[in-house]
Image (spheres, helix red, strand yellow):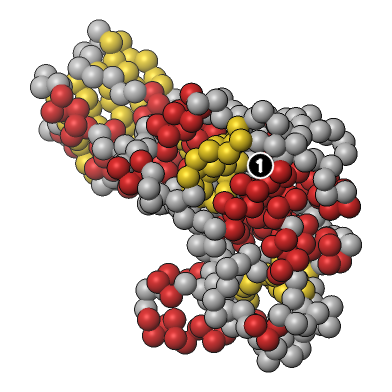
Amino acid sequence: MSKADGERMLVSRIEEGTVIDHIPDWRADTVSRVLRLDKLAKMQADISVVILQNVSSKGLGRKDIIKIDRWHVDERDADILCLVFPGITVNFIDDGEVSKYTPRVPDTIEGRLRCPELNCISNTEREPVITRFATLKKESMLQCQYCDALLGFDKVPDHVRT
Amino acid sequence: MGLSADFLGRDVVSARDFKRDQYDEILRAVEDLEKNNTSLDGALKGKLAALLFFEPSTRTYSSFQIAAEKLGMAVSGFAGPTGSSITKGETLHDTVRMFEGYGADVFVIRHSKMGAARFAAEISDVPVVSAGDGSREHPTQAMVDLYAIRKAFGKIDGLKVGMLGDLRYGRTSSSLAYALSNFDVEITFIAPEALQMRPEVSHLLMQRGVTPKTAVALKDVAGSLDVLYVTRIQKERIPDPTEYEKVKGMYEVNLEALRDAKPSLKVMHPLPRMDELSTDIDETNYAQYFVQAAGGLPLRMVLLNLILGGVR
């Protein structure tokens, strides 16, 4: 069996769901954290998640892939992913048909992230604040629209609301 | 006094939200009021100011209260959490909604959390004026500070302003830095590294073409400054107590620390002061802080009048 055949056999194709490709090698756990996949599995038992790590890739040398059977990733979450991994690709699969979604850097992110400033009103228990960040694309940073704190794109996975 | 539509119904939650011509308009209006100090008396008769001070305050609360009363407004609210339902855990959200139901025409809010004023402004249908939110901002103090600078020099452009002390957690210095970014000034942040200005403040300044200088010790820059804005270094902000002992002397402003200063230097302080500003400055030409404090009342009268559309 050739090496390529062996890797193809790692996982069979899915008929319904999402494939997240071109994740930098050994970073699938970060993607999983941003997408809150652990929470998802608890909510819907029939969803299967397959994580492939260190798979050979023409473009990247090595890469990770995540296949999620019977669940579509929210496009807004895919957009957040592209702040951290700009080269990531997202394929939605419906009845075996693949449609590609190209994540784009969002102008604002609402409700998905925690503010890094602990003393921000959005981190206050019982105040019904929905966090809101503006994207500063040139600086690769987000800015909290309440307290003005800055958050580098690379720190985003650590601030995903659980 | 002219009354600009720019201010009508407007929130005042950040000094960064105002532009040069708006600052100029406010400062001119304060000057007019000081010349004719009864011109706004009763201008907002029949309106209600809700002063919600979730953090204790003496001078800011009093100046807003007196300003509102001189304008003829009714005043309600609280000057600190003690004795209010805040101690029972009532949220900012619910408190604002409640006072809105009582017919408040404007909120003046002080809160320990950063961004509280902006959040309140989102909830409220009537204007919100921040009287300080956490260590983020104190925009009306910045207006008071600009007025004191202009009063001392007759201008703001062309001046070299040093800000000294706890810049990271000091809300007055970040608001003043934002306000000054509308003017042609040179700004130097003088603080130990751990207490230097927050990155978001420096970032906005640079976006506006103002590149602040930084210094660790006052003595290195004292001779070049026109304005020295002093704030207190709070011991509890520096994690290592021995580090605090090392740095505290570097940030005490007294006549000895100012021996190289220009004779025309003005020393400012948002008050209250502790050890960082010696009383031996009080009777010198350097002292501008009492003039600065006195500007708080007319400034807040002018601002409320502009926001609520009182006397033209």
- Give the amino acid at mark 1: Ala
Q: Where B147 sits versus B25, above or below?
A: below
Q: Where B310 sits versus B142, above or below?
A: above
Q: Residue at x 58, y 73 (%)?
A: B273
Q: Is residue A145 visible?
A: no
Q: Nearer the viewer, residue B262 or A35?
A: B262
Instruction: Point out residue B122 in the picture as x, y percentages from the top left corner.
Output: 52, 30
User: Which quarter shows the C terminus of chain B?
Assistant: top right
Q: Residue furthest left?
A: A45
Q: Residue at x 59, y 58 (%)?
A: B59
Instruction: Point out residue A125 in the picture as x, y percentages from the top left corner.
Output: 31, 41
Q: Nearer the viewer, residue B180 or B283?
A: B283
Instruction: Point out residue A14 in the picture as x, y percentages from the top left corner.
Output: 20, 18
Q: Nearer the viewer, residue B250 or B4?
A: B4
Q: Residue at x 63, y 83 (%)?
A: B278
Q: Secondary structure at mark 1?
A: helix
Q: Chain of mark 1?
A: B
Q: Where B180 sits versus A42, above or below?
A: below
Q: Nearer the viewer, residue B84 or B228?
A: B84
